[in-house]
Structure formats: structure tokens, C-alpha cells
Image: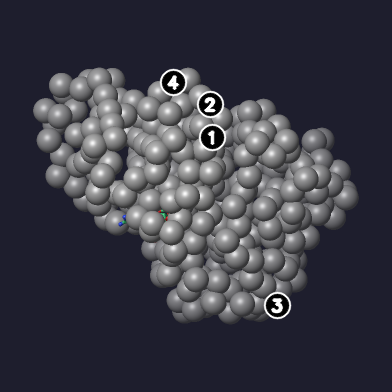
């Protein structure tokens, strides 16, 4: 197979040995694999793949066709179109994915949409439901709402019956985020004026954190998922006390096989039908060949995109 490979902090497109599926794994010819912020951090040497994943082939989500299955696989078969979550190794022409971390690709989805679905929709679903206990009628703030997780979070929160406030710093992308279901799309500096929030999906980190805490409703929850603008904040604990507020954080990649399977199964039950019916969608801002990974990573780092950048084989 060919694989995007990290060598001395650089990305190369190299020939590598094909992976061999374990008992519960699917061997997949990859058609599309989404890029994520963690891939960029991994190239810089700061976010190693978890044990069991290839340490030098990035990529945490993929879509493709099953070409072989392990001995204990029961849910998928050769020929199936699947999309899945992996600890690493997605950005290659062939990859393995545990069958409990894979979902069928709806017939309505293109390969790039499927390849950019799992990481951001699983993250947004888990943050809103499992971590944030979203409920119908909640006023929900999604920061960094034009990105991959943000566009997923806006759509899922809106589909649940929440009132969604999306913060987007680029005015050119506010209308399209509104079209995804946000009730109000605001500049990050205006967040405080649009509360009080029952739930904040914090995808940016330190930059607007104090404003988010100050705009929490009584019993409000902040779920911290991304810290691209910084991870260190000064926090007035009294502001949390008087709101009976909860701040929690979460990562997906380092979870156990069973924990990830629980998230995938929730997404399969609750999000996949809406995706198949076109009620939620995966905004793909650009597709680029895997062989051009360095350019794709640069485009991701430059920002100003809506949703996903996806590598295609
Ligand atoms: N905890 C987890 O398990 C998990 C899982 C997935 C992702 N993440 C993290 O969550 C974050 C969001 O992921 P993503 O895939 O949605 O990334 P993304 O596609 O790059 O989106 C990030 C969004 O945040 C905006 N943004 C960045 N810095 C900002 C700032 N200082 N002020 C206001 N807006 C800012 C960006 O705007 P511009 O386009 O204008 O730059 C972009 O719209 C990333 O940090 C990622 O690493 C965590």
C-alpha cells in the first residue's frame, strides 16, 4: 500500500507493508480520510498515536470498501462500504478498523463526506449528549462553529430541538453556518450578549472561555473539546459556584475499544438515520489527493474553511 508517513517531522507518500486485520478488524481499501487538528499536532511530534495504531501514519477517520475480515467479525462483510474511527493509520490506501468502530456508509453519501464524518460527528455527539446532557429547548453555544466539529455540533444540537448560538470569527462563513441550523451566528466577541447558555460546546479553548463562563445559565455546563487558542485560563471559581456550573473536558482518541464502540453505536442509532435522510450533512470544503498531504495539511492550518478537508486515494 501507499501511506502518508511522518518522517522527521515531515510528511511523505511512501510504500508500506499492508496491515493485517486482527480477529475483530476489517481490512479496508480507503477511498477517503478526513484531516483533523490532531493530525497536525502529531506531525509536530506532540500527539502520539495510541498503542496498537501505526505510530507514523496519521489519520483518525476513514471511509472505504471492506476487502477482508478477521475471524470474529460478524457485523460487516467483504464488499461493504464502511466509515470508521481509528487510532491512526487512516491516511493510507489500505487500513484496518475495528468492526465495532465502523458504520455502514449510507447510499446517499459520497466517499469524501463519509471519510470526513466519524471523528467530528462522534466527537460532537459524545460532547453534546454523553458529556453535556443536552436537552430539548437548551440554549447551546458552539464556539469555532465553522470547523469540522463545530458544523457537526450545530446541526446535532439543532436537530435535538436546542436553540443554537454559533460563534464564527469569519463574517463570510456566518450565513452558511446559519443555514446548518444555528438560530443566531455571532462574532466570538459578542458571545456574552447572547446567553445565558445551558450548554457550551467549547472548541476554541482559552480565547473566549471567560466570556462563556460569565454567560452560563444556572446549572450550565461547559464541555471543553478543543484548545487551539490556548489551554491555560484564569477561572473565577465564584462564577462557577453561583451558577452551580459544571466544566468538563474530554478526548476521544485515547479511549478504550469498548468506550469508542459505545460512542459509535450511539452515533449509529441516533445520527446515521438523519445523515442518510439528508437532515444532517458533512460539509466538505476541499478534497485533495493523499499524495498531496503536505498541501492539504497547510490548507487545514490556514483555516478559513467550512467543515472538513478530506484526503482521497
Ligand atoms: N477532544 C477531542 O476528542 C477532539 C476531537 C476532535 C477535535 N478536537 C479539537 O477540537 C477543535 C475543533 O476541531 P475541528 O476539527 O472543528 O477543527 P477546525 O475544523 O480547524 O475548526 C476550528 C474552528 O475554530 C475556529 N477558531 C480557531 N481559533 C479561533 C480563535 N482564536 N477564535 C475564534 N475562532 C477560532 C476556526 O476558525 P478559522 O477557520 O477562522 O481559523 C475554525 O472555524 C480542535 O482544536 C481539535 O483539535 C478534539
Nearest to the eye among marks 1 and 3: give it: 1
Q: Report the label total.
A: 4
Instruction: Say few, some or many: other residues with alpha carbon within 10 Å of mark 4 (under 14 / 14 to 19 / 20 or more).
Output: some
Residue at 15% across, 29% down:
239
Residue at 29%, 35% in the rendered image? 194
Q: Quadrant of the C terminus?
A: bottom right
Mark 1 and mark 4: Cα distance apart in space: 13 Å
Q: Are marks 1 and 2 in contact (CB under 8 Å)?
A: yes
Circle nearer the viewer, 2 or 3: 2
Colouring scheme applied when the structure was drawn: one colour
Q: Residues within 10 Å of mark 2 (few under 14, many from 20)?
A: some
Which numbered disc, 1 or 4, marks the residue closer to the eye?
A: 4
Q: Residue at x 73, y 36 (%)?
A: 277
Nearer the viewer's eye, disc 4 or disc 3? 4
N-term mark: 2 or 3: 3
Residue at the spot of label 4: 137
Query: Is the residue marked by circle 1 packed among few (<14), some (14-19), or many (20+) residues within 10 Å?
Result: many
Mark 2 touches mark 4? (CB < 8 Å): no
Residue underneath mark 1? 156
Picture coordinates of residue 288, whole percent (x, y): 64, 71
Q: How far across and down, in percent of the image, does residue 269 sit?
A: 67, 28
Q: Nearer the viewer, residue 141 or 24?
A: 141
Mark 2 and mark 3 residues within 8 Å of each other at the beta carbon: no
The answer to whether the residue bearing label 1 lies less than 8 angstroms from the nearest atom of ligand 1 is no
**In the rendered image, which quarter contains the N terminus?**
bottom right
Amino acid at each position: 500500500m501507499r501511506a502518508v508517513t511522518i518522517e522527521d517531522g515531515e510528511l511523505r507518500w511512501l510504500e508500506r507493508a499492508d496491515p493485517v486485520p486482527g480477529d475483530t478488524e476489517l481490512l479496508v481499501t480507503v477511498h477517503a480520510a478526513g484531516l483533523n487538528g490532531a493530525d497536525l499536532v502529531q506531525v509536530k511530534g506532540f500527539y502520539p498515536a495510541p498503542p496498537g495504531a501505526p505510530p507514523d501514519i496519521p489519520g483518525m477517520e476513514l471511509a472505504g470498501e471492506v476487502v477482508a475480515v478477521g475471524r470474529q467479525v460478524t457485523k460487516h462483510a467483504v464488499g461493504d462500504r464502511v466509515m470508521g474511527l481509528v487510532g491512526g493509520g487512516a491516511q493510507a490506501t489500505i487500513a484496518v478498523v475495528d468492526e465495532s468502530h465502523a458504520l455502514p456508509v449510507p447510499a446517499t453519501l459520497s466517499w469524501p463526506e463519509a471519510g470526513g464524518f466519524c471523528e467530528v460527528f462522534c466527537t460532537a455527539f459524545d460532547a453534546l449528549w454523553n458529556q453535556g446532557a443536552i436537552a430539548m429547548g437548551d440554549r447551546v453555544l458552539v464556539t469555532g462553529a465553522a470547523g469540522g466539529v463545530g458544523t457537526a455540533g450545530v446541526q446535532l444540537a439543532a436537530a435535538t430541538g436546542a436553540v443554537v448560538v454559533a460563534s464564527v470569527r469569519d463574517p463570510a462563513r456566518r450565513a452558511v453556518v446559519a443555514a446548518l441550523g444555528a438560530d443566531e451566528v455571532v462574532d466570538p466577541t459578542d458571545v456574552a450578549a447572547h446567553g445565558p447558555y445551558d450548554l457550551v460546546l467549547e472548541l476554541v479553548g482559552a480565547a473566549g472561555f471567560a466570556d462563556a463562563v460569565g454567560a452560563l445559565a444556572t446549572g450550565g455546563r461547559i464541555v471543553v473539546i478543543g484548545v487551539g487558542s490556548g489551554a491555560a485560563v484564569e477561572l473565577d471559581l465564584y462564577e462557577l459556584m453561583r451558577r452551580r456550573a459544571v466544566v468538563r473536558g474530554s478526548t476521544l482518541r485515547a479511549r478504550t475499544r469498548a468506550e469508542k464502540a459505545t460512542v459509535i453505536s450511539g452515533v449509529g442509532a441516533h445520527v446515521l438515520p438523519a445523515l442518510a435522510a439528508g437532515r444532517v450533512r458533512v460539509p466538505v470544503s476541499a478534497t485533495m489527493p493523499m499524495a498531496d498531504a503536505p498541501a492539504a495539511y497547510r490548507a487545514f492550518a490556514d483555516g478559513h474553511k467550512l467543515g472538513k478537508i478530506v484526503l482521497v486515494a
